[in-house]
Amino acid sequence: MNRPWIARALIGCSLCLLALPASAQTNLPGITVTAPYTSEHGSYLISGDFKVDPRMPAVVFAAQALVKDDILSIRPIRLADDEYLVLQECARADCSEALIVRVWNAGGATGLVGNSENRIWIKHENKYFIWLKRLPWLGSTAGCQQCGSRFASFERMSPPLTLIPVGQLAAYNRRALSVAEAAAPVPVQSQKHEGSTFVVTFEGGSTVRIKRMHAAN
């Protein structure tokens, strides 16, 4: 996988909408979100202004960079036993490294998730991206019955679009993982807007509903 090209695409894709006419946009504090994918609920403006860049057909981006105090809602409708939905953010200006923000498997979000496993409080402006990875489904692992069958711990820092499991389950299955880790993410099959929610379906049928919330005042 051409990592420098991926990094350049991650940086460049969020600039694609800057040429849109002002009449086609809705202004939010600190960000601009394209109509008609915006609604208001209580004290929040809600937007489904996300996209899949044709150069990276497996990756979902916010059309405009997420900013401090946004709330990002990511709700997997169904994940297969071997699928892992990943939210990463660029950790360097050139995005040559990325930080794992949250991972979901078929059992829900992994790790510490705060008050909600499907909502992420954005603490600083950055480029965030969402993608789906398949790793081996192991069932019960001989010699490690306490390990479970799904990976739940991952290296926090890695190249973009890379998911590296750690822990006992990963240690028992390093050979199987070495092949899976090198494989490309799952491509997006379809995308659509349902009001202020972006709905993306990956090849295989797994669907994710995504939106951002920003305080109106």
Image (cartoon, helix red, strand yellow):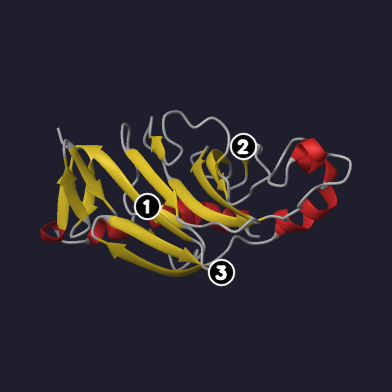
Give coordinates of residue 36: x percent, y percent.
18, 60
Give coordinates of residue 26: x percent, y percent.
15, 51
Q: Distance between the residues labelled 3 and 2?
A: 28 Å
Q: What residue type is labelled 1?
A: Ile
SS label for mark 3: loop
Single out the residue that lies furthest toward the right. 143
Q: Mark 2 or 1, which is nearer the eye?
A: 1
Report if residue 94 is visible in the image: no
Q: Distance between the residues labelled 3 and 1?
A: 18 Å
Report crowding for label 3: few under 14, some 14 to 19, many 20 or more residues within 10 A (C-alpha). Answer: few
Residue located at (29% from left, 63% from top)? 193
Residue ID for mark 2: 157
SS label for mark 1: strand
Mark number for residue 90? none
Q: In this view, does 194 lie above or below 109?
A: below
SS label for mark 2: strand
Tally of numbered tags: 3
Mark number for residue 204? 3
Residue ID for mark 1: 210
Q: Which of marks 3 and 2 is nearer the N terminus?
A: 2
167, 63: nearer the viewer: 167
